[in-house]
């Protein structure tokens, strides 16, 4: 069992810098809930960061990260709990968010190479929550598509560097939700923030 998080980093993975739409509002709501409960919150909007795509293994292993990525690494280190929010794009996280993880979770910072290709995890002791919005019903993504994109982020990215537990919240049918359901969704996310989960 993990303890409820005291310091929380909310990573909004929506590529649109316009700060409109569901993901941005969910990030605000989670932050409100967490702050109401006296938790320390930092925010990162991937769309506002200045970085390019990683191009090579040697850049991954040897180059200094761009300044915005170095600052993001400090925020990741600071937080007990990471909340990653993104819209499902082509069954997965948007490419810009994947590019962020490639940049930020470099060896030396997030892990080091151990025996037989297994990682020495540097981000142990931290938990994470993944919140994903999508056009299709969430149960279709989970049961028919097997939620491969979310599993990849959970297992291959976050757990690989030490995050545990990594929980998820999938919000489906976002284009057709009634007002009442939207209200419940936001209340649920505010409660997650309050509880630091
Ligand atoms: C490029 C793109 C790809 C998308 N791919 C999917 C998809 O594979 N499955 C799905 O259910 N919805 C898909 N959607 C719908 C988005 O998931 C949905 O509009 C988003 O979650 C709403 O959140 P937002 O208001 O924060 O953008 C896609 C949308 C875009 C723009």
Image (cartoon, rainbow, N blue to C red):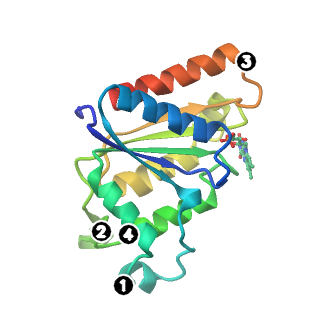
Q: Earlier in the sequence, mark 4 or mark 1?
A: 1
Q: Is residue 180 left or right of residue 187?
A: right
Q: Is residue 61 left or right of residue 153?
A: left
> Which residue is painted at 50% across and 83% down in the image?
56
Report the residue marked by disc 3: 178
Q: Is residue 4 visible?
A: yes
Q: Earlier in the sequence, mark 3 or mark 4?
A: 4
Viewer-proximal residue among 102 and 144: 102
Separation of marks 2 and 3 at Cα, in angstroms? 43 Å
At which x and y percent is residue 107? 33, 72
Look at discs 4 and 2 and give the one toward the viewer.
Answer: 4
Q: Earlier in the sequence, mark 4 or mark 2?
A: 4
Q: Residues within 10 Å of mark 2 (few under 14, many from 20)?
A: some
Viewer-proximal residue among 183 and 62: 183
Separation of marks 4 and 1 at Cα, in angstroms? 14 Å
Q: At numbered mark 1, what does the secondary structure look like: helix, strand or loop? A: helix
Q: Residues within 10 Å of mark 4 (few under 14, many from 20)?
A: some
Q: At numbered mark 3, what does the secondary structure look like: helix, strand or loop? A: loop
Report the residue marked by disc 1: 62
Check whether the beta carbons of the residues at disc 4 and disc 2 lie within 8 A of each other.
no
Report the residue marked by disc 2: 109
In the rendered image, the vertical position of residue 116 relative to residue 92, given as above or below = below
Check whether the beta carbons of the residues at disc 3 and disc 4 lie within 8 A of each other.
no
Q: Residue furthest top?
A: 180
Look at discs 3 and 4 and give the one toward the viewer.
Answer: 4
At which x and y percent is residue 59? 44, 83
Q: Is residue 109 left or right of residue 105?
A: left
Q: At numbered mark 2, what does the secondary structure look like: helix, strand or loop? A: loop
Q: Residues within 10 Å of mark 3 (few under 14, many from 20)?
A: few
In the rendered image, the vertical position of residue 156 relative to residue 175, given as above or below = below
Report the residue marked by disc 4: 70
């Amino acid at each position: 069992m993990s303890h409820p998080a005291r310091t929380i980093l909310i990573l909004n993975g929506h590529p649109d810098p316009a700060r409109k739409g569901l993901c941005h509002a969910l990030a605000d709501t989670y932050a409100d809930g967490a702050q109401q409960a006296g938790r320390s919150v930092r925010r990162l909007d991937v769309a506002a960061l200045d970085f390019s795509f990683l191009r090579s293994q040697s850049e991954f292993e040897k180059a200094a990260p761009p300044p915005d990525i170095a600052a993001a690494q400090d925020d990741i280190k600071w937080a007990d709990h990471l909340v990653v929010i993104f819209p499902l794009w082509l069954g997965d996280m948007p490419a810009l968010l994947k590019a962020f993880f490639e940049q930020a979770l470099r060896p030396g910072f997030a892990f080091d190479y151990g025996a037989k290709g297994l990682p020495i995890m540097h981000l142990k002791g931290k938990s994470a929550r993944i919140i994903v919005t999508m056009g299709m019903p969430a149960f279709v993504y989970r049961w028919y598509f097997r939620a491969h994109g979310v599993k990849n982020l959970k297992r291959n990215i976050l757990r690989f560097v030490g995050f545990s537990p990594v929980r998820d919240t999938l919000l489906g049918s976002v284009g057709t939700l009634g007002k009442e359901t939207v209200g419940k969704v936001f209340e649920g996310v505010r409660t997650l923030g309050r509880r630091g989960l």
